[in-house]
């Protein structure tokens, strides 16, 4: 369950790790994740959208520039709003194929968060059309949900 996951699990979901500045005055242990600084309007809207998945399937996509905290904001939102859900991050053999195959085969249980960090890699032309079609079918079938498809994407790719 998401609520049982820790900071190391966040790294497996591609949330960026804290790094230590190379200074002589730094002697403290650096945490795995830096402290999260909420952005009230943005985080409130994201959390409301994520929480809505408790009542029906939906897709939420966070779009922004590189290193603006998209993935971390998604991590914080699911931990806060859906701690009793499973999470699945399709990676292998190739992101679009892993996603399309699992959805098509019905291997995803209801009450799952499908984590699509860098969603452009799942929806790009090489296999992305099939992945998008399978996601659309999943969202349209209430018997297979509720599920949350949660992704992030760089603004440069939002017009695929």
Image: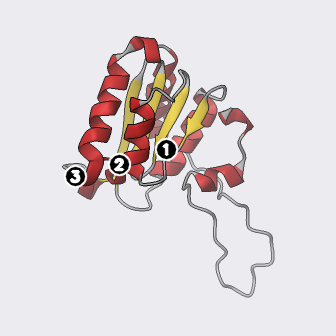
Instruction: Classify 31 as above or below 62.
Output: below
Q: Which residue is mark 1?
A: 39
Residues at marks 3 and 1, CA–CA distance in whole angstroms:
33 Å
- Pointer 2 and pointer 3: residues touching (CB < 8 Å)? no
Residues at marks 2 and 1, CA–CA distance in whole angstroms:
27 Å
Figure coloring: secondary structure
Q: Quadrant of the N terminus?
A: top right
Q: Which residue is mark 3?
A: 125
Q: Position of residue 66 (x, y in %)?
A: 39, 61
Residue at position x 32%, y 18% from top? 140
Which one is in front in this view, the residue at disc 2 or the one at disc 1?
Answer: 2
Mark 2: few/some/many CA within 10 Å (<14, 14-19, 20+): many
Instruction: Classify 149 as above or below 25.
Output: above
Q: Position of residue 39 (x, y in %)?
A: 49, 44
Mark 1: few/some/many CA within 10 Å (<14, 14-19, 20+): few
Instruction: Classify 1 as above or below 38.
Output: above
Residue at position x 58%, y 41% from top? 76
Q: Secondary structure at mark 2?
A: helix
- Pointer 2 and pointer 1: residues touching (CB < 8 Å)? no
Q: Which residue is mark 2?
A: 122
Q: Secondary structure at mark 3?
A: helix
Instruction: Report the residue that reaches farthest toward the left.
Output: 159
Q: Position of residue 8 (x, y in %)?
A: 70, 54
Residue nearest the viewer, comparing 88 with 16: 88
């Amino acid at each position: 369950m998401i609520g049982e996951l820790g900071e190391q699990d966040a790294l497996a979901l591609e949330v960026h790790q804290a790094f230590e500045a190379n200074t002589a005055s730094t002697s403290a242990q650096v945490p795995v994740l830096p402290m999260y600084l909420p952005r009230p309007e943005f985080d409130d809207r994201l959390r409301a959208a994520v929480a809505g998945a408790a009542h029906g399937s939906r897709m939420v996509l966070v779009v922004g520039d590189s290193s603006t905290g998209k993935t971390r904001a998604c991590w914080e939102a699911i931990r806060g709003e859906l701690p009793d859900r499973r999470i699945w991050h399709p990676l292998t053999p190739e992101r679009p194929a892993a996603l399309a195959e699992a959805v098509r085969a019905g291997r995803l249980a209801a009450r799952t968060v499908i984590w699509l960090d860098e969603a452009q890699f799942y929806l790009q032309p090489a296999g992305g059309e099939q992945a998008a079609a399978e996601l659309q079918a999943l969202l349209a079938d209430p018997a297979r949900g509720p599920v949350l498809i949660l992704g992030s994407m760089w603004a440069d790719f939002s017009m695929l």
